[in-house]
Image (spheres, rainbow, N blue to C red):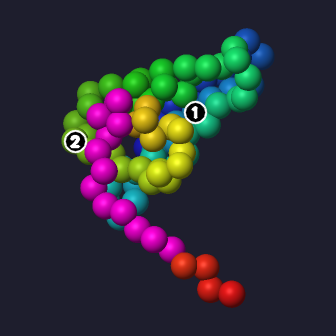
Amino acid sequence: MPCSTLAVDETDRVIAGVIVTNRDGLPWIATVFRQPGPCYVGLGAALLRRMLADAAASGLTEIGLVVSDANPARHLYEKLGFQLTSTSLTVLVP
């Protein structure tokens, strides 16, 4: 979706991104990624803020994502305004 955003370095290599897709009519964050390393700390959060601003400017009123309880990024998502709306469990069938 147009609110997706990427960050590139001085050589035009993608170093971080937030990719938003359409999932059954709901804008959905498919992935958030960044290069590892201390020089990139905070870049994912900055891109999420940018994506949310672009989404709001284009009239979107909600965006979904999936995150596990153990994912340390969950705190960031909640800080940015994401709210828990449902939970699920999966069983792995041998």
User: Is residue 62 positioned above or below 45 on the image?
Assistant: below
For the record, the magenta segment spans 78-90
From this viewpoint, is residue 54 visible? no
**Residue corresponding to mark 1:** 17
User: Is residue 16 positioned above or below 94 on the image?
Assistant: above
Quarter holding the N terminus is top left
Q: Residue at x 73, y 23 (%)?
A: 37
Q: Is residue 70 magenta?
A: no
How many residues crowd mark 1 within 10 Å: few (<14), some (14–19), many (20+)? many
Amino acid type assigned to the residue bearing label 2 in the image: Thr
Provide residue 24's location: percent of width, then percent of height.
35, 64
Q: Is residue 58 left or right of residue 11?
A: left
Q: Residue at x 36, y 63 (%)?
A: 87
Amino acid type assigned to the residue bearing label 1 in the image: Gly
Quarter holding the C terminus is bottom right
Q: Residue at x 62, y 86 (%)?
A: 93
User: Is residue 62 positioned above or below 7 on the image?
Assistant: below
The first of marks 2 and 1 along the sequence is: 1
**Residue corresponding to mark 2:** 61
- Callout 2–callout 1 Cβ contact below 8 Å: no
Provide residue 8's location: percent of width, then percent of height.
66, 21
Provide residue 58's location: percent of width, then percent of height.
28, 33
- Secondary element type, mark 1: strand
From this viewpoint, is residue 17 visible? yes
View extreme (right): residue: 11
